[in-house]
Image (cartoon, grey):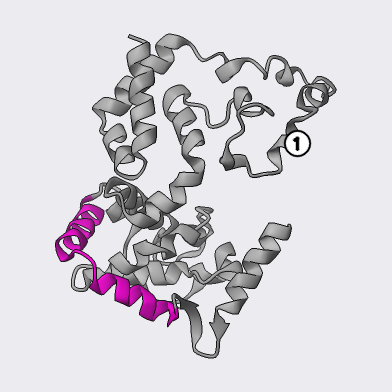
Protein backbone atom coordinates (compact mmCIF):
# COMPACT_ATOMS: atom_id res chain seq x y z
CA UNK A 1 0.00 0.00 0.00
CA UNK A 2 2.88 2.36 0.75
CA UNK A 3 4.24 1.89 -2.77
CA UNK A 4 0.81 2.51 -4.25
CA UNK A 5 0.38 5.67 -2.17
CA UNK A 6 3.71 7.01 -3.39
CA UNK A 7 2.72 6.29 -7.00
CA UNK A 8 -0.56 8.17 -6.58
CA UNK A 9 1.30 11.07 -4.96
CA UNK A 10 3.71 11.26 -7.91
CA UNK A 11 0.81 11.24 -10.35
CA UNK A 12 -0.98 14.01 -8.47
CA UNK A 13 2.17 16.12 -8.53
CA UNK A 14 1.94 16.09 -12.32
CA UNK A 15 -1.61 17.39 -12.25
CA UNK A 16 -2.16 21.12 -12.65
CA UNK A 17 -4.78 23.36 -14.31
CA UNK A 18 -3.28 22.58 -17.72
CA UNK A 19 -3.56 18.80 -17.36
CA UNK A 20 -1.14 15.92 -16.83
CA UNK A 21 2.54 16.65 -17.32
CA UNK A 22 5.31 14.31 -18.49
CA UNK A 23 8.85 15.55 -18.79
CA UNK A 24 7.64 19.13 -18.23
CA UNK A 25 4.99 18.97 -20.99
CA UNK A 26 1.21 18.44 -20.80
CA UNK A 27 0.39 14.76 -21.45
CA UNK A 28 -1.06 15.10 -24.95
CA UNK A 29 1.65 17.54 -26.00
CA UNK A 30 4.32 15.17 -24.68
CA UNK A 31 2.86 12.28 -26.68
CA UNK A 32 2.67 14.47 -29.78
CA UNK A 33 6.32 15.48 -29.42
CA UNK A 34 7.33 11.84 -29.22
CA UNK A 35 5.24 11.01 -32.27
CA UNK A 36 6.88 13.79 -34.32
CA UNK A 37 10.25 12.19 -33.65
CA UNK A 38 9.00 8.75 -34.63
CA UNK A 39 9.69 6.79 -37.79
CA UNK A 40 6.92 7.61 -40.27
CA UNK A 41 7.44 4.36 -42.15
CA UNK A 42 7.06 2.42 -38.90
CA UNK A 43 3.86 4.31 -38.11
CA UNK A 44 2.43 3.26 -41.46
CA UNK A 45 3.38 -0.38 -40.90
CA UNK A 46 1.72 -0.36 -37.50
CA UNK A 47 -1.54 0.93 -38.97
CA UNK A 48 -1.40 -1.66 -41.76
CA UNK A 49 -0.73 -4.51 -39.33
CA UNK A 50 -3.63 -3.44 -37.15
CA UNK A 51 -6.11 -3.23 -40.02
CA UNK A 52 -4.91 -6.47 -41.62
CA UNK A 53 -5.31 -8.46 -38.40
CA UNK A 54 -8.12 -11.01 -38.70
CA UNK A 55 -9.67 -9.67 -35.48
CA UNK A 56 -9.92 -6.08 -36.69
CA UNK A 57 -13.31 -6.39 -38.41
CA UNK A 58 -14.78 -8.00 -35.31
CA UNK A 59 -13.30 -5.54 -32.80
CA UNK A 60 -13.75 -2.27 -34.71
CA UNK A 61 -16.88 -0.87 -36.33
CA UNK A 62 -17.72 2.83 -36.05
CA UNK A 63 -17.47 4.91 -32.89
CA UNK A 64 -20.51 7.09 -32.19
CA UNK A 65 -18.65 8.83 -29.34
CA UNK A 66 -21.31 8.00 -26.73
CA UNK A 67 -18.82 7.42 -23.92
CA UNK A 68 -20.49 4.25 -22.60
CA UNK A 69 -17.17 2.40 -22.69
CA UNK A 70 -15.43 5.06 -20.63
CA UNK A 71 -18.22 5.09 -18.05
CA UNK A 72 -17.58 1.38 -17.39
CA UNK A 73 -13.77 1.50 -17.50
CA UNK A 74 -11.93 0.78 -14.20
CA UNK A 75 -8.66 2.48 -15.28
CA UNK A 76 -10.61 5.65 -16.12
CA UNK A 77 -11.31 5.99 -12.40
CA UNK A 78 -7.64 5.61 -11.50
CA UNK A 79 -5.44 6.90 -14.33
CA UNK A 80 -5.53 9.04 -17.45
CA UNK A 81 -7.13 6.43 -19.75
CA UNK A 82 -10.32 6.26 -21.83
CA UNK A 83 -11.28 3.36 -24.14
CA UNK A 84 -13.28 5.86 -26.22
CA UNK A 85 -10.04 7.62 -27.15
CA UNK A 86 -8.55 4.30 -28.26
CA UNK A 87 -11.39 3.71 -30.73
CA UNK A 88 -11.33 7.32 -31.92
CA UNK A 89 -7.60 7.18 -32.69
CA UNK A 90 -7.97 3.83 -34.42
CA UNK A 91 -10.76 5.36 -36.51
CA UNK A 92 -8.49 8.18 -37.74
CA UNK A 93 -5.25 6.18 -37.86
CA UNK A 94 -5.19 5.63 -41.62
CA UNK A 95 -5.06 9.36 -42.34
CA UNK A 96 -3.17 10.33 -39.20
CA UNK A 97 -0.98 7.37 -38.16
CA UNK A 98 0.89 9.49 -35.64
CA UNK A 99 -2.26 9.55 -33.50
CA UNK A 100 -2.11 5.80 -33.12
CA UNK A 101 1.66 5.77 -32.65
CA UNK A 102 1.65 8.33 -29.86
CA UNK A 103 -1.05 6.38 -28.04
CA UNK A 104 1.09 3.22 -28.13
CA UNK A 105 3.93 4.94 -26.31
CA UNK A 106 2.30 4.92 -22.87
CA UNK A 107 -1.47 5.12 -23.12
CA UNK A 108 -2.47 1.56 -24.01
CA UNK A 109 -0.52 0.02 -21.13
CA UNK A 110 -3.05 1.39 -18.63
CA UNK A 111 -5.77 -0.94 -19.96
CA UNK A 112 -6.79 -3.73 -17.55
CA UNK A 113 -8.11 -5.95 -20.41
CA UNK A 114 -11.35 -6.49 -18.47
CA UNK A 115 -13.45 -5.93 -21.62
CA UNK A 116 -16.20 -4.09 -19.75
CA UNK A 117 -16.08 -1.60 -22.63
CA UNK A 118 -17.04 -4.31 -25.12
CA UNK A 119 -20.11 -5.27 -23.10
CA UNK A 120 -21.68 -1.81 -23.21
CA UNK A 121 -20.74 -0.50 -26.67
CA UNK A 122 -23.89 -0.02 -28.79
CA UNK A 123 -21.75 -0.21 -31.94
CA UNK A 124 -20.19 -3.51 -30.77
CA UNK A 125 -16.65 -2.11 -30.70
CA UNK A 126 -14.12 -3.89 -28.50
CA UNK A 127 -11.65 -1.22 -27.28
CA UNK A 128 -9.94 -3.73 -24.98
CA UNK A 129 -9.45 -6.09 -27.92
CA UNK A 130 -7.96 -3.28 -30.00
CA UNK A 131 -5.59 -2.48 -27.13
CA UNK A 132 -4.54 -6.14 -26.96
CA UNK A 133 -3.75 -6.05 -30.68
CA UNK A 134 -1.77 -2.82 -30.29
CA UNK A 135 0.20 -4.29 -27.40
CA UNK A 136 1.11 -7.29 -29.57
CA UNK A 137 2.28 -4.94 -32.33
CA UNK A 138 4.32 -2.93 -29.82
CA UNK A 139 6.05 -6.11 -28.65
CA UNK A 140 6.60 -7.29 -32.21
CA UNK A 141 8.35 -4.03 -33.13
CA UNK A 142 10.25 -3.77 -29.85
CA UNK A 143 8.84 -0.36 -28.95
CA UNK A 144 10.42 1.19 -25.87
CA UNK A 145 7.10 1.21 -24.00
CA UNK A 146 6.78 -2.57 -24.52
CA UNK A 147 10.30 -3.19 -23.25
CA UNK A 148 9.69 -1.05 -20.17
CA UNK A 149 6.36 -2.74 -19.41
CA UNK A 150 7.51 -6.33 -19.93
CA UNK A 151 10.89 -6.12 -18.23
CA UNK A 152 9.65 -6.65 -14.64
CA UNK A 153 7.80 -9.80 -15.79
CA UNK A 154 10.69 -11.34 -17.68
CA UNK A 155 10.93 -14.48 -15.54
CA UNK A 156 7.17 -15.06 -15.65
CA UNK A 157 7.28 -14.72 -19.44
CA UNK A 158 10.14 -17.22 -19.54
CA UNK A 159 8.08 -19.68 -17.47
CA UNK A 160 5.05 -19.30 -19.74
CA UNK A 161 7.16 -19.93 -22.84
CA UNK A 162 9.01 -22.96 -21.47
CA UNK A 163 6.30 -24.69 -19.43
CA UNK A 164 2.98 -23.14 -20.47
CA UNK A 165 2.43 -22.25 -16.81
CA UNK A 166 2.50 -18.65 -15.63
CA UNK A 167 3.82 -19.19 -12.12
CA UNK A 168 5.53 -22.37 -11.00
CA UNK A 169 6.25 -23.47 -7.41
CA UNK A 170 10.02 -23.12 -7.73
CA UNK A 171 9.44 -19.38 -8.15
CA UNK A 172 7.96 -19.24 -4.63
CA UNK A 173 11.14 -19.53 -2.64
CA UNK A 174 13.39 -17.45 -0.40
CA UNK A 175 16.30 -18.65 -2.55
CA UNK A 176 17.18 -16.99 -5.85
CA UNK A 177 14.56 -14.27 -5.54
CA UNK A 178 13.80 -12.18 -8.56
CA UNK A 179 12.53 -8.63 -8.77
CA UNK A 180 9.16 -9.54 -10.29
CA UNK A 181 7.87 -10.25 -6.77
CA UNK A 182 9.22 -7.11 -5.12
CA UNK A 183 11.40 -6.67 -2.00
CA UNK A 184 8.76 -8.11 0.35
CA UNK A 185 8.89 -11.57 -1.23
CA UNK A 186 11.66 -12.89 1.05
CA UNK A 187 9.53 -12.27 4.13
CA UNK A 188 6.46 -13.88 2.59
CA UNK A 189 8.43 -16.97 1.55
CA UNK A 190 9.90 -17.82 4.96
CA UNK A 191 7.07 -20.11 6.08
CA UNK A 192 5.43 -20.91 2.75
CA UNK A 193 5.90 -24.70 3.00
CA UNK A 194 4.38 -24.84 6.48
CA UNK A 195 1.49 -22.62 5.46
CA UNK A 196 0.76 -24.71 2.38
CA UNK A 197 0.83 -27.91 4.40
CA UNK A 198 -1.85 -26.39 6.67
CA UNK A 199 -4.27 -25.80 3.78
CA UNK A 200 -6.76 -28.73 3.82
CA UNK A 201 -7.29 -28.81 0.09
CA UNK A 202 -6.24 -31.79 -2.03
CA UNK A 203 -5.29 -29.58 -4.95
CA UNK A 204 -2.50 -28.10 -2.84
CA UNK A 205 -0.79 -31.50 -2.72
CA UNK A 206 2.43 -31.52 -4.68
CA UNK A 207 2.45 -27.82 -5.52
CA UNK A 208 6.11 -27.61 -4.58
CA UNK A 209 7.02 -29.92 -7.44
CA UNK A 210 9.08 -27.94 -9.91
CA UNK A 211 7.20 -26.71 -12.97
CA UNK A 212 3.97 -28.44 -11.91
CA UNK A 213 5.37 -31.70 -13.33
CA UNK A 214 5.01 -30.58 -16.94
CA UNK A 215 6.06 -33.43 -19.22
CA UNK A 216 9.34 -32.90 -21.07
CA UNK A 217 7.78 -33.76 -24.43
CA UNK A 218 5.06 -31.16 -23.82
CA UNK A 219 7.61 -28.45 -23.03
CA UNK A 220 9.65 -29.35 -26.09
CA UNK A 221 6.59 -29.22 -28.35
CA UNK A 222 5.57 -25.86 -26.86
CA UNK A 223 8.95 -24.30 -27.60
CA UNK A 224 8.99 -25.73 -31.13
CA UNK A 225 5.60 -24.12 -31.80
CA UNK A 226 6.85 -20.79 -30.45
CA UNK A 227 9.87 -20.91 -32.74
CA UNK A 228 7.90 -21.86 -35.84
CA UNK A 229 5.14 -19.32 -35.15
CA UNK A 230 7.61 -16.46 -34.75
CA UNK A 231 6.84 -15.92 -31.06
CA UNK A 232 10.51 -16.08 -30.10
CA UNK A 233 11.45 -13.51 -32.70
CA UNK A 234 8.67 -11.21 -31.50
CA UNK A 235 9.68 -11.52 -27.84
CA UNK A 236 13.33 -11.10 -28.80
CA UNK A 237 12.52 -7.66 -30.18
CA UNK A 238 11.63 -6.47 -26.67
CA UNK A 239 13.33 -8.95 -24.33
CA UNK A 240 16.30 -10.52 -26.09
CA UNK A 241 17.54 -12.22 -22.92
CA UNK A 242 14.25 -14.09 -22.48
CA UNK A 243 14.22 -15.28 -26.10
CA UNK A 244 17.85 -16.43 -25.78
CA UNK A 245 17.09 -18.37 -22.59
CA UNK A 246 14.08 -20.09 -24.17
CA UNK A 247 16.16 -21.13 -27.17
CA UNK A 248 18.88 -22.40 -24.82
CA UNK A 249 16.31 -24.42 -22.88
CA UNK A 250 15.01 -25.90 -26.14
CA UNK A 251 18.53 -26.97 -27.14
CA UNK A 252 19.05 -28.72 -23.80
CA UNK A 253 15.94 -30.83 -24.47
CA UNK A 254 17.10 -32.09 -27.88
Q: In which quarter of the image is the C terminus?
A: top left
> Which structural element holds mark 1?
helix
- In screen coordinates, is 188 left or right of 62? right
Find residue 114 and report its horizontal and vertical position in percent: 54, 53
Check the image and report above or below for 8 versus 206: below
- In screen coordinates, is 254 left or right of 3? left
Residue 252 in magenta stretch: no
Check the image and report above or below for 213 versus 53: above
Find residue 27 and report its horizontal and vertical position in percent: 43, 77
Q: Which residue is drawn at 50% across and 55% down?
A: 115
- In screen coordinates, is 54 left or right of 185? left
Q: Nearer the viewer, residue 226 or 169?
A: 169
* Magenta highlight range: 24-52
Q: Which residue is drawn at 37% across and 81% down?
A: 29
Residue 37 in magenta stretch: yes
Q: Which residue is drawn at 17% across and 62% down?
A: 44
Find residue 192 and report its horizontal and vertical position in percent: 77, 27
Q: Name the residue under label 1.
A: 188
**Does residue 221 appear in the picture of this structure?**
no
| Quadrant assignment, res 50 | bottom left
Q: Which of 250 and 71 is in front in this view?
A: 250
Q: Please identify the dominant SS of the magenta region.
A: helix
Find residue 105 and report its horizontal and vertical position in percent: 36, 63
Q: Which residue is drawn at 56% across and 13% down?
A: 213
Q: Nearer the viewer, residue 127 or 200?
A: 200
Amino acid sequence: MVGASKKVARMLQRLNPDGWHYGGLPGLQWEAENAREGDRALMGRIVDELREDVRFEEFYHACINCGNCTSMCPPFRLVDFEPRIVVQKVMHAKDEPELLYQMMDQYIWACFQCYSCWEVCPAHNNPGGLVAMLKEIAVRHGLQSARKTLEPYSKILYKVMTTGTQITPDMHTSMALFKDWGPHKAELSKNIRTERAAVPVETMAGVMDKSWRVDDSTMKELMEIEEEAGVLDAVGGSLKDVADMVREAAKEME
